[in-house]
Image (tube, coloured by chain):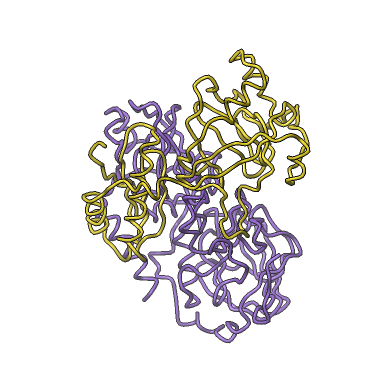
Amino acid sequence: MSETSMADAAALRVEKAGPLATLQDAGRFGVRRMGVTQGGPADLHAFAWANYLLGNDWGAAGLEITLGGLTLVAERDLCLALCGADLSATLDGEPLAPWQAFTLHKGQRLAFGIPRAGVRGYLAVPGGFKGSPVLGSLSCVTREGLGGHSDAGTPLAEGECLRIDAGALADASAGEARAVPMEERLDYLAPAVLGLIPGAQIADFTGPSLFRAFHAEWRVDARADRMGVRLTGPRLECRLDGMISEGIALGAVQVPPDGQPIALLNDRQTVGGYPRLGTLTPLACARLAQCQPGQTVHLAPIALGAAQSDYRRFIAALQA
Amino acid sequence: MRLPRLENAGVDAWLVRLFDTIDEANMPWLMALCRGCEDAFGTALVDLVPSYTTLLVHYDATQLSAGEARARLANILADLRPNEEAAAGAIKEVPVWYDESVGPELERLMVATGLDRQALIELHAGHEYRVFALGFAPGFAFMGSLDERLAMPRLDTPRQRVPAGSVAVAGRQTSAYPRQSPGGWNLIGRTPLRLFDQHREEQSYLQVGDRVRFKPVDRAEFERLGGDPRPVPATQEVRP
């Protein structure tokens, strides 16, 4: 269990755990040469806006709630922010919409039901949740057994408590003046267009395959998790068979011999050896992480400069 | 060395491709490139992933534009000299208990090579291996190159649970599983070492560039060193 200092205070108790709820911060960096993955929020966009609502750094540790099913009880009065998927949240039985800050009084229940739109909801607290960082990060990677509230990579379990900095309670009204701009409150049920920066092996795919890659409707497969999301559609053919394993960036879209692309997300393995169409932008990764199995997505080529400008604008808006 | 190539890997990463084939002689160049990036990028460096022939350089896109990052890499490459000192690599010893109970594929190797048990062990332990990359799991080192006679394809059906410490071969590579995980490599023995420990100062026992020697030990020594001698489960779970 994580060490707790006098300054930490119990904030939320898990009454019902649900399928998967994990602590995430900006991610684990400088460690990939040891085979340790990046971690961090699968939907950077919603995660960061939740922190913004409370005046936190965008990377402060928050809760990633996958597919709902979680019930939390407040151990004290709290100001919280919820962004991302609509997981049928209720506050003491009353519906609670995402993309807002709200107050949860001691003893009140925050419950998540079934996903109505999107897959992952993000819950932020003032100053971020507290715990013992592993390799510089609180991000929970279950496959590696690293990080999270327990520091052993375990998801939230019934009866456990999430802790916050007791001093941060004083800032509970910080979120009142802040709002997420309307255009940032994404409709996750709408067809997604994912920006993809073409990569070095793009010319090794056959012409018809390239046409299909950027014109087909791709269906999000049920084989989708924090490691990656498989897309099904027309078969893409690449003239390269396999490659010598090399470092894999966030959002890399690899195409194994079955011709069905896999977009690699936060918990991907650090190296891999399949040819790649290119790399999804960070915001495209975030959008894909909110697609339910069966939803359709389009891949749209985007120039590196434009993608980098989008990313910088996004980060700058959070710091405004 | 071929002309290096800089390949885009997203809004905040470049992949530097230095070579086209796996070779120990690549390592001094890759180590030098790692050092060069640490010096040239400073706080704008987010992560480095060296592997066999390439280096993935992940930088902070709020500090540097893609063009600026590319220019820095081009500068490093213009003056790149193999770093023999860094590339000499630390010598690491990995004790291994070679036994059918913890290395069920020893038998498969005996049949395939016609070598007896002792000859197989001598062949695997008699060579110094280089760590080319870490990946698959924290602390999992891809080491080469294995004697051609020991090169075996992966198992047709991967195991659901490979016990921690399992020493394995696949193709012309060898490795050891730091923790229990699924895996398709051929198991030939087990090390008592904890290859990855998040609470240790050097979390991963093996690092890219290290030179590794496997040292045969008997069961008593394996257990004295803290090894878990429970055999690899014979029956594999079937995925639902």
| Residue in front for this viewpoint, B142 or A111 | B142
Task: Please give the name of the residue rendered at 30% of the width and 33% of the height, measured from the top-left corner.
Answer: A210
Chain A display color: purple
Task: Please give the name of the residue rendered at 78% of the width and 38% of the height, measured from the top-left corner.
Answer: B220
For the N terminus of chain A, the quadrant is bottom right
Q: Position of residue A226 (x, y in %)?
A: 54, 49
Q: Relative to B114, is A228 on the left or the right?
A: left
Q: Relative to B159, is A176 on the left or the right?
A: left
Report how many numbered discs are placed on residues in the image: 0
Q: Position of residue A106 (x, y in %)?
A: 70, 79
| Residue in front for this viewpoint, A254 or B119 | B119
B42 over B231 or under it: above or below: below
The quarter of the displayed image where residue B69 is located? bottom left
Q: Relative to B224, is A280 on the left or the right?
A: left
For the C terminus of chain A, the quadrant is bottom left
The quarter of the displayed image where residue A72 is located? bottom right
| Residue in front for this viewpoint, A318 or B110 | B110
Task: Please give the name of the residue rendered at 61% of the width and 34% of the height, measured from the top-left corner.
Answer: B183
A44 over A34 or under it: above or below: below
Q: Position of residue B41 (x, y in %)?
A: 32, 61
Q: Position of residue B181 (x, y in %)?
A: 64, 40
A166 over B175 or under it: above or below: below
Give me the chain that's yellow.
B
